[in-house]
């Protein structure tokens, strides 16, 4: 109750999300599209603990911080859907994508205010602390995709992308991630045409590689930081760089069966998956005598596989709707 009566903490967040695009059709089946998007976040926090509170004794304490995050993203693609004939459909897509994000923040703490009516940092007799920081990252990607459909029942897809990230070592900024998929819509076959019980049946399989870049923005770099001592400024090493730090990659194989019964009133999926992850990104401990405690490295592998089942039903459709959904998965690693 004392803190509620004698302290305050106000946080304000301002966000603007905007995007624009342009598309030009060279032919009826050839499209070029370019888009750009911005995401701007401004966060402000102001806190004051009065002199009657435990944290604010004896003269009150004030804290103020601001943070701004600017994310920029652009995608440029070319899409071609050549007209072959009614039994064949082909779609080709290629493009380039760029994402860049920067973040700035600063804060200041003041103590010893004239009284609790003066709560701005400018009224503090002592500036007890302050800090500021800036960080950022960027991704550059090239990608291509092809989808082919024969007789509306045989499906083939392939994609290939090259992703580059500022987070990795200068020797391994880019990673390649291919994938391929096949599908067979069995209910489009003549031997299942005309029956009513089974409304949809599709067998599918895929194999592909994905990457993980969820590490610190500067995990691969040698870092230094300022360290004052006896009113003098100095520089100390903070992190050891790893020039060969690279993408964590996961190779995954999937095979599954999709089905629909009684006009898709009951639908479901049966899947088997096998995932193998290599070059795991981990904070690896190092001897303390080196002056550091950990270093980010590609260490170890991980494998897991299992089955997934899902079942959905539409029991009532109309003014009153009742649907059910059930899923279960089992895996080992």
Image (tube, grey):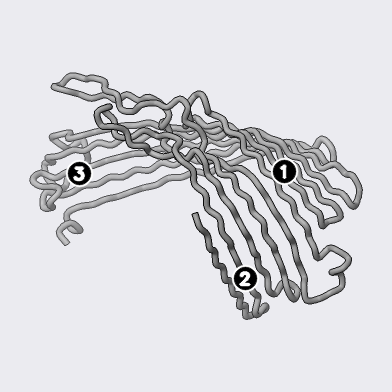
Q: Is mark 3 on a helix, strand or loop?
A: loop
Gap in angstroms between the C-alphas marked 3 and 2: 59 Å
Mark 3 closeness class: few <14, some 14–19, many ≥20 residues within 10 Å: many
From the top left corner, tell me how far across and down residue 231 is, in percent.
15, 21
Q: Which residue in the structure is indicated by mark 2?
A: 311
Residue located 41% across and 40% down the image = 282
Mark 2 closeness class: few <14, some 14–19, many ≥20 residues within 10 Å: some
Q: What element carries label 2?
A: strand
| Mark 3 or mark 1, earlier in chain | 3
From the top left corner, tell me how far across and down residue 45 is, in percent.
31, 45
From the top left corner, tell me how far across and down residue 47 is, in percent.
24, 46
Residue located 89% across and 44% down the image = 84
Is there any visible trace of residue 119 in the rendered image?
A: yes
Q: Which residue in the structure is indicated by mark 1?
A: 158
User: Residue 227, located in which quarter of the rendered image?
Assistant: top left
Is there any visible trace of residue 34 in the rendered image?
A: no
From the top left corner, tell me how far across and down residue 102 is, in percent.
45, 33
Screen quadrant of the N terminus: bottom left
User: Residue 129, located in which quarter of the rendered image?
Assistant: top left
Residue located 18% across and 38% down the image = 110
């Amino acid at each position: 109750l004392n803190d509620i009566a004698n302290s305050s903490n106000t946080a304000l967040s301002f966000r603007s999300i905007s995007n624009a695009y342009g598309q030009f059709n060279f032919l009826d089946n050839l499209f070029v599209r370019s888009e750009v998007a911005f995401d701007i976040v401004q966060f402000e926090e102001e806190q004051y603990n009065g002199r009657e509170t435990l944290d604010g004794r004896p003269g009150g304490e004030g804290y103020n911080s601001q943070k701004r995050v600017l994310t920029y993203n652009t995608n440029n693609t070319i899409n071609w859907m050549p007209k072959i004939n009614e039994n064949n459909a082909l779609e080709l897509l290629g493009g380039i994508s760029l994402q860049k994000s920067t973040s700035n923040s600063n804060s200041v703490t003041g103590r010893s205010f004239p009284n609790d009516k003066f709560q701005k940092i400018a009224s503090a007799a002592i500036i007890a602390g302050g800090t500021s920081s800036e960080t950022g990252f960027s991704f550059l990607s090239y990608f291509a995709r092809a989808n082919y459909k024969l007789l509306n029942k045989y499906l083939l897809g392939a994609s290939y992308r090259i992703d580059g990230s500022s987070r990795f070592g200068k020797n391994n900024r880019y990673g390649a991630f291919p994938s391929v998929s096949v599908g067979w819509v069995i209910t489009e076959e003549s031997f299942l045409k005309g029956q009513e019980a089974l409304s949809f049946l599709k067998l599918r399989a895929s194999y592909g590689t994905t990457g993980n870049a969820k590490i610190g923005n500067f995990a691969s770099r040698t870092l230094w930081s300022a360290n004052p001592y006896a009113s003098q400024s100095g520089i100390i090493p903070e992190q050891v760089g790893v020039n060969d730090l690279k993408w964590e990659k996961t190779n995954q194989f999937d095979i599954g069966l999709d089905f629909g019964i009684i006009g898709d009133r009951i639908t479901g999926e049966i899947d088997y998956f096998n995932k193998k992850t290599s070059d795991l990104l981990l904070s690896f401990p190092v001897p303390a005598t080196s002056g550091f405690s950990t270093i980010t490295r590609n260490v170890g592998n991980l494998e897991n596989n299992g089955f997934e089942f899902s079942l959905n039903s539409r029991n009532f459709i109309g003014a009153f709707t009742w649907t059910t959904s059930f899923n279960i998965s089992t895996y080992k690693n």
